[in-house]
Image (tube, rainbow, N blue to C red):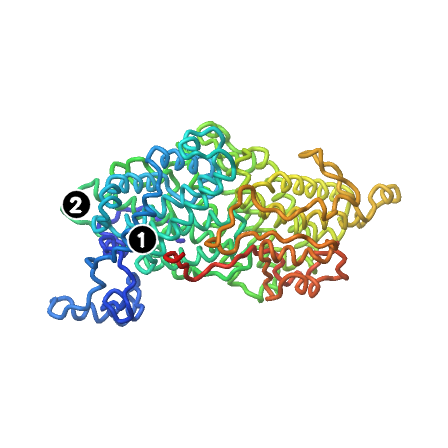
């Protein structure tokens, strides 16, 4: 995203297509050849972009339309009537929203306890959607009068239900909304969260994504978040794909050419400027997710930065009264903003694209890797005092209580980038091995400190487990194949892994990925080698195989051979999980075989659908990349030219039959 240049410019109607589709009604899928199925809009039929005018159809439009004598075909009529069944079903689903007081409390739960981490929504915009929906919901649901809804407002119930579903994943004890919703235990909370998310998804299926709005994009981002917190990372990536394509249809990746209307009020102008800022923030979140899923999970990129002209979002909080707020960034010395975190991630995301663009040529010139490493350090050093990781200005922490955690997450994110930046070269280059090891240790240290700051009901956040597992796997692999150079380094590695295993044990009741990760790290831990250069006095103190000792976080961890016994690791199903045929890709229960060292592959494949970048899966992939015979102890002694990271997948149906059974 280009750096924003703040200068005087005209303001007026945005060129994004939302203005042309907001009044469109939802239509039932008509039979093949019907008006509702086959649009008479030539651009729609051919697939021409409605936001990028560099194509033949737009040239024809400009040639024919100045005198309006030759009208072009229009888009599908927005007056088409819905079939009664679709109207009834939509209203049934929308009516599942609880009373406004309950919705408001759950929205507050989300923004208080979760959005500081995900940075997925703007609170003002969500609450504005709620207000707009409540003002018209009675007429819509009781009388099935859907023609009163704009296209954007049609999607409001889906977004709100998905926000509630995520909020329930982080519901603190003793809330009024829990009493109102008759939530008595974790099972009932989990069941309701799943029900809300499923209903939101069904609304999206009824409405479709072919004429998207910003609200429909935000729904898919929240569904992505819900799935990740359920340890269903592969499905979440598919919803990112849906969000990317909708956002591109809306032109969120393009900076609009804004012109001023002479008769427009200042309040109207400011409202539209802030609406444009909201769209920039939505695009920034998509851009970040796409880049980091590419870097860490080995997924292909879906966005090319050369296609993007949109500015970076403002570094300030979203105002409570946009029509009366001038859209300029707040001075850093006056008020810091959590949006600094988003801008920081945007800067790193651009570096991801730089890295991916280098391709295989970089293997012949490691100076480019070091240059990117240095650029990341510069980005971190340029952070404002309130959010810099080293010697921060903590004077604002009482007002922004999440700043300490955001600073730690910045450390984790930057060092995760460095870790993955050097990972392909650790097998042959000592400098990359040292950099990756140090970065992994910093990730684990920051995750430990963040763990000490969060509450138990926040343990389900996907990243808490994933960053620990991701760094722990690489650190274990390096320590097995390349023993530590000193006792001091080995001490650091062992302590970091002990804490990681303990954290995952504590997180596992709320996270299936934590349970799986704990199994892996416990398998790797005893095989970590002694220091490469140890003295005679050290040889007895540091044998090649380390039993797992007690750790500071729990007094129940076993030591010795029992530490890796499969009997201590029954297959985990998240607390309160509900079997649901609608939710494809849930965690089935598969018992581990008696021979844990060989059945671990099938176990991992079955519970989380491990995927490997070379196309192989499970035991075959590990055996193909292992440097020694697999005995259950060398799980991750792999070829570092391949992507070793774990992709937690499940099946996502292309179509869900909501209307039978």
Residue 104 % position (x, y): 36, 35
Q: Nearer the viewer, residue 219 or 299?
A: 219
Please tell me the numbered disc located at residue 264. Answer: 2
Whether residue 58 sits left or right of residue 531 in the image: it is left
Whether residue 214 sits left or right of residue 143 in the image: it is right
Residue 305 % position (x, y): 42, 59
Whether residue 481 is visible here, answered yes or no, is no
Q: Earlier in the sequence, mark 1 or mark 2?
A: 1
Whether residue 76 is visible here, answered yes or no, is yes
Cα separation between marks 1 and 2: 24 Å
Please tell me the numbered disc located at residue 213. Answer: 1
Residue 532 drawn above or below residue 248: above
Image quarter of residue 491: top right
- Quadrant containing the C terminus is bottom left
- Residue at image point 41% right, 50% down: 284
- Residue at image point 69% right, 60% down: 638
Residue 27 % position (x, y): 26, 59
Dot in front, 1 or 2: 1
Outermost residue to the front: 661
Residue 454 % position (x, y): 54, 34
Image quarter of residue 653: bottom left
């Amino acid at each position: 995203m280009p750096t924003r240049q703040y200068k005087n410019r005209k303001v007026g109607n945005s060129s994004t297509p939302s203005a042309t589709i907001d009044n469109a009604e939802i239509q039932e899928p008509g039979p093949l050849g019907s008006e509702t199925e086959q649009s008479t809009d030539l651009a729609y039929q051919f697939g021409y972009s409605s936001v990028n005018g560099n194509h033949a159809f737009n040239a024809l439009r400009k040639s024919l339309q100045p005198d309006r004598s030759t009208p072009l075909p229009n888009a599908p009529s927005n007056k088409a009537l819905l079939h009664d069944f679709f109207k009834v079903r939509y209203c049934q689903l929308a009516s599942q929203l609880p009373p406004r007081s309950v919705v408001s409390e759950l929205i507050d739960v989300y923004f208080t306890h979760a959005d500081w981490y995900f940075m997925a929504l703007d609170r003002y915009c969500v609450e504005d959607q709620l207000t707009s929906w409540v003002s018209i919901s009675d007429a819509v649901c009781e009388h099935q009068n859907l023609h009163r809804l704009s296209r954007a407002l049609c999607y409001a119930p889906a977004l709100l239900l998905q926000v509630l579903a995520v909020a329930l994943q982080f519901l603190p004890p003793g809330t009024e909304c829990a009493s109102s919703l008759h939530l008595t235990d974790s099972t009932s909370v989990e069941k309701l969260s799943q029900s809300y998310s499923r209903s939101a998804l069904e609304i999206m299926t009824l409405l479709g994504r072919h004429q998207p709005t910003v609200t429909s994009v935000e729904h898919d981002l929240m569904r992505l978040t819900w799935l990740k917190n359920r340890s269903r990372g592969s499905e979440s990536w598919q919803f990112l794909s849906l969000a990317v394509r909708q956002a591109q249809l809306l032109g969120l990746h393009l900076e609009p050419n804004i012109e001023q209307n002479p008769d427009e009020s200042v309040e109207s102008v400011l409202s539209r400027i802030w609406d444009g800022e909201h769209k920039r923030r939505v695009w920034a979140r998509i851009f970040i997710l796409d880049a980091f899923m590419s870097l860490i999970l080995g997924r292909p990129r879906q966005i090319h930065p050369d296609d993007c002209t949109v500015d970076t979002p403002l570094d300030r909080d979203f105002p409570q009264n946009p029509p009366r707020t001038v859209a300029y960034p707040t001075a850093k010395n006056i008020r810091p903003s959590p949006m600094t975190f988003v801008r920081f991630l945007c800067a790193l995301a651009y570096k991801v694209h730089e890295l991916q663009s280098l391709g295989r040529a970089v293997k012949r010139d490691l100076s480019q890797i070091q240059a990117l490493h240095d650029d990341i350090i510069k980005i971190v050093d340029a952070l404002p005092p309130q959010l810099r990781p080293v010697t921060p200005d903590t004077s604002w922490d009482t007002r922004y209580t999440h700043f300490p955690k955001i600073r730690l997450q910045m450390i984790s994110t930057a060092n995760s980038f460095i870790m993955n930046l050097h990972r392909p070269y650790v097998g042959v280059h000592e400098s990359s091995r040292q950099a990756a090891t140090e970065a992994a240790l910093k990730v684990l240290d920051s995750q430990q400190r963040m763990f000490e700051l969060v509450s138990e009901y926040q343990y389900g956040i996907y990243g808490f487990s994933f960053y620990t597992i991701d760094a722990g796997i690489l650190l274990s692999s390096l320590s097995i194949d390349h023993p530590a150079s000193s006792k001091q380094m080995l001490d650091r590695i062992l302590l970091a892994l002990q804490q990681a295993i303990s954290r995952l044990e504590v997180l596992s009741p709320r996270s299936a990925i934590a349970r799986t990760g704990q199994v892996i790290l416990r398998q790797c831990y005893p095989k970590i080698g002694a220091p490469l250069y140890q003295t005679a006095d050290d040889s007895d103190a540091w044998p090649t195989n380390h039993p797992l000792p007690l750790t500071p976080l729990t007094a129940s961890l076993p030591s010795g051979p029992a530490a890796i016994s499969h009997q201590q690791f029954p297959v985990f199903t998240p607390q309160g999980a509900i079997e649901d045929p609608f939710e494809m890709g849930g965690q089935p229960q598969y018992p581990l075989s008696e021979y844990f060292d060989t059945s671990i592959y099938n176990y991992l494949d079955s519970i989380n659908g491990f995927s490997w970048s070379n196309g192989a899966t499970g035991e075959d992939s590990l055996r193909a990349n292992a440097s020694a015979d697999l005995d259950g102890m060398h799980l991750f002694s792999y070829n570092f030219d391949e992507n070793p990271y774990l992709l937690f997948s499940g099946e996502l149906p292309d179509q869900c039959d909501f209307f039978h059974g």
